[in-house]
Image (tube, rainbow, N blue to C red):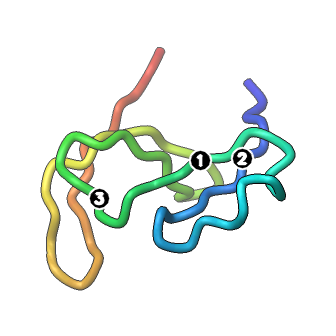
């Protein structure tokens, strides 16, 4: 499967003028929370998971979902 490019991501506190956004965009609130779905790049591959614990210094515990 080929993964398409992610749309641009903006934080609510740094959202540009909506008239300048011409395509699909993601608006995220300021905090990650337990239960959020995430993708991350590791070992030349994207992995999908869910946040299970918020640690300090912007680090998180994630459970990985493997699909067959």
Element marked by disc 1? strand
Q: Residue at x 29, y 41 (%)?
A: 50
Q: Residues within 10 Å of mark 2 (few under 14, many from 20)?
A: few
Q: Nearer the viewer, residue 55 or 11?
A: 11
Query: Helix, strand or loop at disc 3?
Result: loop
Query: Upstream in the sequence, badge 1 or badge 3?
Result: 1
- Where does the image place residue 5, in percent across and percent down from the top left? 77, 44
Q: Are marks 2 and 1 in contact (CB under 8 Å)?
A: yes
Q: Which residue is mark 2?
A: 7
Measured as percent of width and height from the top left, residue 22 is found at 86, 46
Q: Label 1, on which residue?
A: 26
Horizontal side of residue 12 vs 9, given as left or right: left
Q: CA distance from mark 2 to mark 3?
A: 18 Å
Instruction: Judge by depth and name the residue closer to the eye, 19 or 1.
Output: 19
Image-quadrant location for residue 3: top right
Label 1 – label 3 distance at C-alpha: 14 Å
Q: Secondary structure at mark 2?
A: loop
Above or below, 22 against 1 in this view is: below
Location of residue 58 with respect to 29 vertically, above or below: below
45 with respect to 50 (left or right): right
Res 32 label? 3
């Amino acid at each position: 499967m080929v993964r398409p490019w992610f749309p641009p991501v903006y934080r609510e506190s740094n959202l540009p003028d909506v008239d300048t956004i011409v395509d699909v965009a993601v608006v995220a609130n300021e905090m990650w929370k337990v239960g959020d779905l995430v993708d991350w790049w590791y070992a030349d591959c994207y992995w999908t998971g869910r946040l299970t614990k918020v640690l300090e210094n912007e680090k998180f515990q994630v459970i990985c979902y493997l699909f067959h």
